[in-house]
């Protein structure tokens, strides 16, 4: 999977490595700002209130 | 026979190389060595058969290889070092040997590796989620809190006159909107820098901003129960160390013009459904309150939602704000 992605990045190594890093950062940002906030309510870490 | 086989192999090898490198038609090529004359260039179609498994657009990158010298021909005078017959000999045998350079769909190894990578990725995502909950949410909350503090500071003007000696005027009515900050909580036991802004509401969004006040329960200083919930392990973890409080510890609630000094009376661990701790008289249904009390709730044990840690307090006194007078930080007893 990772090999496949790397092979399909354009350009020489000097271009591919920053591209790969950017891609990884984009995935992390997507997780932090979209996926994790959406998943969070289902995790009991944040249940602090008293309710029925 | 041996010579012919050799020639076939060489032909395969070169054809394979050419198709794999995408250089067919560009690279000068020689006819079958046993049959052809040395040095004569022949088109690709005139040579031996292509290897059966060779595909035109293989998965290998089309590396820029300028020229590949003929196997039987004399080495080109200006050719790079790797282009000699020795280099060809290095690259040819695996190709001539057959299947390693040809692609025929995902093999068992590919599937195993892909599954392994997927599992490692899943593990990384879970680790990232933990990092997000434990540290990144703190950053979010710190930014929100600083915004709330600025907003309160803009609306709370420090009174210019000295504290009135007479009985203090009634506290200004508080009607904060959902999610708005309206008070600052100081707990000397948890450090002088401990000052989260309490917001109205206990929904997920409000609790991400700071400790949340249960709408409908008493406001700070009012007769009744001032109930606040806060995160224990995430989003700035304002109530992380609530278990360290001891009876008698001051719990100071600051509003625009005064401080309400509550004192902790006791703590309790209860089931998450014990709504009675939020009653005007905690744990006593239907009683009319006669004093101002305070209840703080958070999850317990840490990193769990199994039970709730409840801390109760009773209003001890009210201190008016005055120039040069800070938070009434009395040393905690005990």
Image (cartoon, coloured by chain):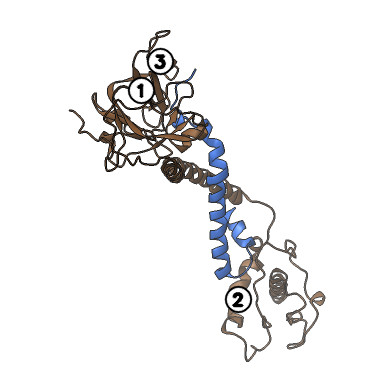
Chain colours: A blue, B brown
| Residue at the extreme top | B286
Q: Is residue B31 above or below residue B200?
A: below
Distance from Cα at disc 3 to Cα at disc 1 = 9 Å
Q: How many marks?
A: 3
Instruction: Determine crowd level at label 1: few under 14, some 14-19, many 20+ residues with C-alpha closer than 10 A.
Output: many
In the rendered structure, which disc, 3 or 1, sits on the residue that comes first in sequence? Answer: 3
Image coords of residue A42 (percent x, y): 53, 31
Q: Which residue is mark 3?
A: B280
Residue B218: which quarter of the image? top left
Q: Residue at 69%, 55% (x, y): give it.
A: B104
Q: Is residue B67 above or below residue A14?
A: below
Which numbered circle lies on residue B89? 2
Disc 3: host chain: B
In the rendered structure, which disc, 2 or 3, sits on the residue that comes first in sequence? Answer: 2
In the rendered structure, which disc, 2 or 1, sits on the residue that comes first in sequence? Answer: 2
Q: Nearer the viewer, residue B4 or A31?
A: A31
Distance from Cα at disc 2 to Cα at disc 1 = 85 Å
Q: Which residue is mark 1?
A: B294
| Residue at the extreme bottom | B77
């Amino acid at each position: 999977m990772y090999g496949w992605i790397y092979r399909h990045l354009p350009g020489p190594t000097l271009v591919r490595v920053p591209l790969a890093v950017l891609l990884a950062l984009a995935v992390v940002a997507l997780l932090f700002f979209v996926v994790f906030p959406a998943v969070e309510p289902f995790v009991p870490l944040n249940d602090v209130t008293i309710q029925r | 026979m041996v010579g012919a086989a050799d020639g076939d192999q060489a032909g395969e090898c070169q054809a394979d190389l050419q198709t794999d490198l995408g250089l067919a038609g560009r690279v000068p090529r020689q006819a079958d060595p046993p049959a052809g004359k040395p040095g004569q260039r022949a088109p690709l179609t005139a040579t031996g058969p292509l290897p059966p498994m060779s595909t035109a657009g293989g998965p290998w990158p089309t590396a820029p290889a300028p020229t590949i010298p003929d196997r039987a021909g004399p080495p080109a005078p200006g050719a790079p070092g790797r282009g000699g017959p020795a280099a060809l000999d290095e690259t040819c045998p695996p190709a001539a040997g057959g299947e390693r350079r040809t692609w025929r769909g995902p093999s068992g190894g590919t599937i195993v590796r892909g599954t392994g990578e997927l599992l490692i990725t899943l593990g990384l995502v879970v680790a990232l989620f933990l990092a997000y909950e434990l540290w990144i949410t703190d950053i979010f909350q710190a930014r929100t809190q600083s915004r709330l503090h600025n907003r309160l500071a803009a609306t709370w003007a420090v009174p210019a006159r000295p504290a009135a000696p007479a009985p203090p005027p009634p506290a200004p009515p508080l009607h904060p909107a959902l999610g708005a900050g309206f008070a600052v909580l100081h707990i000397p036991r948890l450090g002088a820098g401990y000052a989260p802004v309490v917001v109205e509401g206990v929904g997920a969004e409000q609790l991400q901003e700071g400790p949340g006040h249960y709408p409908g329960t008493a406001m700070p200083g009012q007769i009744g129960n001032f109930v606040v919930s806060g995160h224990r392990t995430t989003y700035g973890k304002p109530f992380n160390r609530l278990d360290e409080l001891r009876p008698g510890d001051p719990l100071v609630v600051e509003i625009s013009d005064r401080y309400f000094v509550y004192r902790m009376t006791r703590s309790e661990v209860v089931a998450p459904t014990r709504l009675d701790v939020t009653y005007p008289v905690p744990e006593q249904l239907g009683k009319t309150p006669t004093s101002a009390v305070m209840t703080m709730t958070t999850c317990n044990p840490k990193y769990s939602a199994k039970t709730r840690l409840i801390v109760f307090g009773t209003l001890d006194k009210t201190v008016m704000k005055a120039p040069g007078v800070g938070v009434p930080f009395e040393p905690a007893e005990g």
